[in-house]
């Protein structure tokens, strides 16, 4: 589904990704963890071409993401992304937020879009909140609207960048449950997260990044119990 090969990315003179490689199969859930500034968000943004790269390759379903000839809209349809800041339109209801991109960007039929948007809000467990405005919803509920909005484009892979980091502790869990539901449905997911219990529970593999390289990775049981690299062990000892 996603193949990342020896990716290098610099901002000016500073090399932020220094040879990252990673393969994610259809239906897999991969978690990326690592200290602040290690390049996790940059990597996620390179996967859907929000950032360019200096060398290496990233393909999604076999298509080179950084090919200048690639149709960016087609890529954005395939790859959904949810950030820490959900950025919903405040003057639109939950339902309207979810319906907007399929109507405006994909030019789909409004009636069809509405049926799907209602189903998606149900899927993220927000049935009954269709007509609420973002300001009337908790952070966790708003983030689930953002997830539904992203799913409305019918993506094949979802990228999540610290989507629970800004939430109150009591609403973190409901967002994690939503992501777990998605994963259980077979959605391919790449997540940056500090929720170690969650990573352990749902990830097929966990990657630890530090200073722009992947230090080590493995299935969660091995990764959390038997991390080999001292940098990984130190990070885990601080966070667990
Ligand atoms: P993480 O998500 O792991 O905390 P980031 O990918 O956000 O790390 O950042 C990695 C490094 O790249 C940091 O040193 C950050 O300051 C730098 N960086 C990120 N985005 C930009 C940008 N647009 N311009 C310049 N430097 C950036
Ligand atoms: Mg980040």
Image: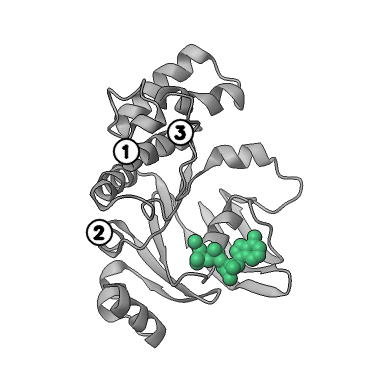
Q: Can residue 22 be seen in this view?
A: no
Asked if 12 appears above or below 28 in the picture, the reply is below
Q: Residue furthest bottom?
A: 230
Q: In the structure shown, which secondary structural element does the residue marked by tag 2 occupy? A: helix
Label 2 C-beta lies within 8 Å of the nearest ligand 2 atom:
no
Residue identifier under label 1 = 138
At x 36% / y 22%, what residue is drawn? Answer: 118
Q: Do residues under tags 3 and 1 come within 8 Å of each other at their CB atoms?
A: no
Looking at the rendered image, the quarter that the C terminus falls into is: bottom left
User: Mark 3 or mark 2: which comes first in sequence?
Assistant: 3
The quadrant holding residue 125 is top left
Percent from the top left, x then y, of residue 223? 31, 74
* Image depth: mark 3 or mark 2 in front: 3
Q: In the structure shown, which secondary structural element does the residue marked by tag 1 occupy? A: loop
Percent from the top left, x then y, of residue 198? 27, 58
User: How many residues crowd mark 3 within 10 Å: few (<14), some (14–19), many (20+)?
Assistant: many
Q: Do residues under tags 3 and 2 come within 8 Å of each other at their CB atoms?
A: no
Asked if 229 appears above or below 114 in the picture, the reply is below
Residue identifier under label 3 = 149
User: How many residues crowd mark 2 within 10 Å: few (<14), some (14–19), many (20+)?
Assistant: few
Q: Can residue 103 be seen in this view?
A: yes
Tell how many labels: 3
User: Mark 2 or mark 1: which comes first in sequence?
Assistant: 1
Question: Left of 179 or right of it: where is 170?
Answer: left
Percent from the top left, x then y, of residue 135? 39, 32
* Image depth: mark 2 or mark 1 in front: 1
């Amino acid at each position: 589904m996603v193949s990342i090969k020896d990716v290098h990315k610099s901002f000016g003179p500073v090399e932020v990704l220094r040879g990252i490689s990673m393969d994610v199969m259809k239906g897999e859930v991969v978690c990326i963890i690592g200290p602040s500034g290690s390049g996790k968000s940059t990597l996620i943004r390179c996967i859907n071409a929000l950032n360019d790269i200096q060398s290496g390759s990233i393909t999604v379903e076999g298509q080179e993401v950084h090919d200048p000839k690639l149709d960016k809209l087609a890529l954005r349809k395939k790859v959904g992304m949810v950030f820490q800041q959900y950025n919903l339109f405040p003057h639109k209801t939950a339902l309207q937020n979810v319906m907007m991109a399929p109507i405006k960007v994909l030019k789909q039929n409004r009636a069809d879009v509405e049926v799907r948007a209602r189903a998606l809000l149900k899927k993220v467990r927000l049935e009954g909140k269709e007509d609420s405005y973002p300001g009337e919803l908790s952070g966790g509920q708003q983030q689930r609207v953002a997830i539904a909005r992203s799913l409305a484009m019918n993506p094949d892979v979802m990228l999540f960048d610290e989507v629970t980091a800004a939430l109150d502790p009591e609403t973190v869990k409901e967002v994690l449950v939503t992501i777990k539901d998605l994963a259980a449905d077979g959605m391919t997911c790449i997540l940056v997260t500090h929720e170690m219990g969650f990573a352990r529970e749902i990830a097929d593999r966990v990657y630890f990044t530090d200073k722009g390289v992947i230090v080590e990775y493995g299935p969660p049981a091995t990764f959390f119990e038997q991390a080999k690299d001292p940098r990984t062990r130190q990070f885990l000892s601080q966070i667990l």
